[in-house]
Image (tube, rainbow, N blue to C red):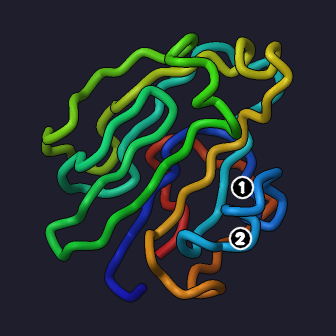
Amino acid sequence: MTGLAVVAPVAGTVVGLGAVPDPVFAQELVGSGTAVEPADGAGVVTVVAPVAGNLMKVHPHAFVVLTPDGVGVLVHLGIDTVHLHGEGFTLHRAEGDDVAAGAPVVSFDVALVRGKGLSAVCPVVVLDSPAGSVSSTTGRTTDAGEPLFA
């Protein structure tokens, strides 16, 4: 992962993927990374691009940014939030848009997600990277746009 600097897409506490309540992320089946748990009491938060590149896939609950070097970085907003069918999410960018690291992509209502009984944790995964290849200091708080891992 040398050379790839990834910023936090959302403010909160950094947690390891093993703490994400979804086996696909927890077992790093789609790639290595980390996750951010939004703070208790968070309402609507703005989610930013973790890297500069092209938005190759955009859904209300998840998006992938493809870097100029061809590395895909997935940001997933909450767990099982696909079942909300966009409720609580507002897209600010469209598939195919170029974005800078830290540029707003989507807003989501953390309180609404939690109110539906879902986890609001946000996995950030370097797609197709080997399991364990990303390390990040967990337990620390971060703001959106601050360095998350390299």
Mark 1, other Cα within 10 Å: few <14 / some 14–19 / many ≥20: many
The quadrant in which residue 84 appears is top right
Dot 1 and dot 2 residues touching (CB under 8 Å): yes
Q: Is residue 121 above or below residue 53?
A: above
The quadrant in which residue 1 appears is bottom left
The residue sitting at 47% across, 21% down in the picture is 107
Mark 2, other Cα within 10 Å: few <14 / some 14–19 / many ≥20: few
Q: Position of residue 75 (x, y in %)?
A: 49, 49
Q: Position of residue 55 (x, y in %)?
A: 24, 46
Helix or strand or loop: what does disc 2 sit on?
A: loop
Helix or strand or loop: what does disc 1 sit on?
A: strand
The residue sitting at 71% across, 55% down in the picture is 14
Q: Is residue 72 above or below residue 49?
A: below
Q: Is residue 21 above or below residue 70?
A: above
Q: Which residue is mark 1?
A: 14
Residue 29 or residue 96, whichever sits in front:
29
Residue 25 or residue 134, whichever sits in front:
25
Name the residue type under label 1. Val
**Disc marking residue 92:** none
> How many marks do you count on the picture?
2
Q: Position of residue 79 (x, y in %)?
A: 70, 40
Name the residue type under label 2. Thr
In the picture, measured across the screen, residue 22 lies left or right of residue 132, that is right
**Label 1, label 2: how many angstroms apart (C-alpha)?**
7 Å
In the picture, measured across the screen, residue 67 lies left or right of residue 78, that is left
The residue sitting at 54% across, 69% down in the picture is 30
In the picture, measured across the screen, residue 146 lies left or right of residue 52, that is right
The quadrant in which residue 35 appears is bottom right
Q: Which residue is mark 2?
A: 137
The residue sitting at 49% across, 60% down in the picture is 147
> Between disc 1 and disc 2, whose residue precedes?
1
In the picture, measured across the screen, residue 131 lies left or right of residue 106, that is right
